[in-house]
Amino acid sequence: MSAQPDDPYGPLVPMPDLTPGALRDAVARITPSRTPGLTRHLFEATTNAQQTQSLAPLRAFVHSWAVFVAIERRPERAVRLRELERIVEAGEQDPTEAITEIRRIRYEAVTEAGL
């Protein structure tokens, strides 16, 4: 796991290396209930990579779970993202501002993950 500058509250775990094992370990520490989903996704990505003779499914797996970890390792960010997603899903108000903030959070997570 690579060192990251911490905000005042600090992340739950350092940003892990972008390998299936390191991502799995981080998910197991942050959100253990999501570990089975990661394992299924990895199995599917590996199978698809073999069938298509392409690394694209594995790259998509790493991207998806690296962004997930980057978001979830900072609880305030994860809670805010879920609030924004509820606003959009409810459809009770103009979602423009919520969508803009969701995009910002995801962009920050992609950048933090080094993708």
Image: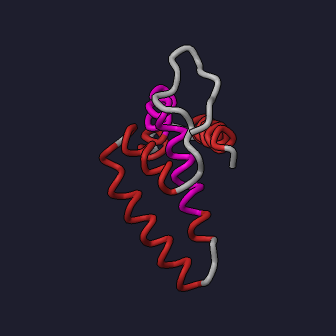
Q: Residue at x 56, y 54 (%)?
A: 19
Magenta stretch contains residue 16 = no
For the N terminus, the image quarter is top right
84 vs 2, nearest the viewer: 2
Q: Position of residue 66 (x, y in %)?
A: 56, 48
Does residue 96 appear anywhere in the picture? Answer: no
39 vs 74, nearest the viewer: 39
Q: Position of residue 31 (x, y in %)?
A: 36, 41
Q: Residue at x 50, y 57 (%)?
A: 20
Give the extent of the magenta segment: 60-84
Q: Residue at x 47, y 37 (%)?
A: 72
Note whether 85 is above or below 60 in the view shown. above
97 vs 77, nearest the viewer: 77
Q: Position of residue 10 (x, y in %)?
A: 52, 21
Q: Is residue 66 left or right of residue 41?
A: right
Magenta segment's dominant SS is: helix
Q: Residue at x 50, y 42 (%)?
A: 69
